[in-house]
Image: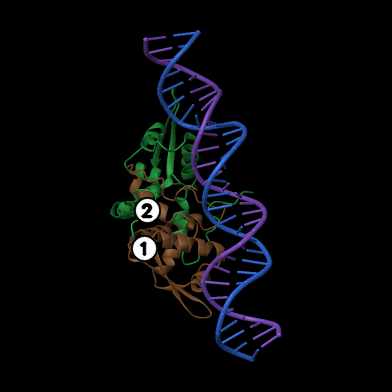
Chain colours: A brown, B green, C blue, D purple
Amino acid sequence: MAKLRHSRFDCAPGCAVEAAVGLIDGKWKSIILYQLLKGTLRFGEIHRLIPNVTPRMLTNQLRELEADGLITRTVFAQVPPRVDYALSPLGRSMEPVLMALKAWGDAHIGLYGKPHEVAGA
Amino acid sequence: MAKLRHSRFDCAPGCAVEAAVGLIDGKWKSIILYQLLKGTLRFGEIHRLIPNVTPRMLTNQLRELEADGLITRTVFAQVPPRVDYALSPLGRSMEPVLMALKAWGDAHIGLYGKPHEVAGA
DNA sequence: GCCTATACTATCATAAAGGATAGCATGATG
DNA sequence: CATCATGCTATCCTTTATGATAGTATAGGC
């Protein structure tokens, strides 16, 4: 059996932090959730907003976010196919976390804006 | 050359979020930072607070956090050795992120408290 | 002299994360 | 009939993350 995701929850003092981090653990997940804050998006729209992700990984991480209950996936029976992704109420409850991350990133992005050029802290 | 950590910063709209997430990307990092919110800790104290981490990984992630400027490491020339770890001002500025993660985790830990038992969202 | 403590280091191993590339079914369009 | 769009899937591959285990230097305590 593959290691269970989130299996590390052991209710130590850091547990709550760990639980939250575990849900956004995946290279593209936090970006996907952040983009969905603005509203429902289709697969292709997400891909245009995050061009560096491969279709395989985008699908993979959308499926995991759905399995974790953070987003909803709605398929429209038409051609070409249309699939809408949106934050679920649980996902929406992550907004304070995502906005805290953004606020921190906005304030400090200059420290890491270029590879190899980390400013002295 | 190994891939640079944080090399994925490309200043897309999610960039700021990505930057912040990249700094806590590592199985134990968010827990370490969370524990250090309470104040300076020695290596062994951190290990007692996070018993599941191996010494190798604890050292590895402490070194990365230090390299990223989030924590400071102070060596005392004595025997047995004593090394203190503390949040740097930059690390301290992550407190809102860590507290947002904790608040979210506290509110929702029940959803993921046990492996294999994800409540319907 | 042996044991203990501390904060690691060294080495090997396993598992997983993520990427690269090519391809698919269906209808619409020209 | 060829091309296009969409949202993927399949397969193989590379890289990285993490773990398991054993070991280390130095002084102090018994």
* Chain to which the residue tagged by mark 2 belongs: A
Q: Which residue is at a point 50% across and 57% down the rendered structure image?
A: A27
Element type at marker 2? Answer: helix
The numbered mark at residue A20 is 2
Within 10 Å of the Cα at label 2, are there few (<14), some (14-19), or many (20+) other Cα atoms? many
Same chain for labels 2 and 1? Say yes or no: yes
Say the numbered circle drawn on residue B24: none
- Residue C19 in the image: x percent, y percent? 60, 59
Q: Looking at the picture, tell me which residue is in the foreground, B28 or D27.
A: B28
> Where's residue C10, x and y in %?
60, 31
In the shown orientation, is residue A61 left or right of residue A102? right
Q: Which mark is residue A91?
A: 1
| Residue type (three-letter) at the residue carrying disc 1 | Gly
Distance from the alpha carbon under mark 2 to that under mark 1: 11 Å
Mark 1 is surrounded, within 10 Å at the Cα level, by few (under 14), some (14 to 19) or many (20 or more) other residues, namely many
Is the C-beta separation of discs 2 and 1 under 8 Å? Answer: no
Q: Position of residue B70 (x, y in %)?
A: 43, 46
Name which residue type carries label 2. Answer: Ala
Please tell me which residue is depicted at 51% across the width and 67% down the height of the picture: A50
In depth, the one of B18 and A58 nearer the eye is: A58
Which chain letter goes with mark 1?
A: A
**Residue A42 versus residue A38: which sits nearer the camera?**
A42
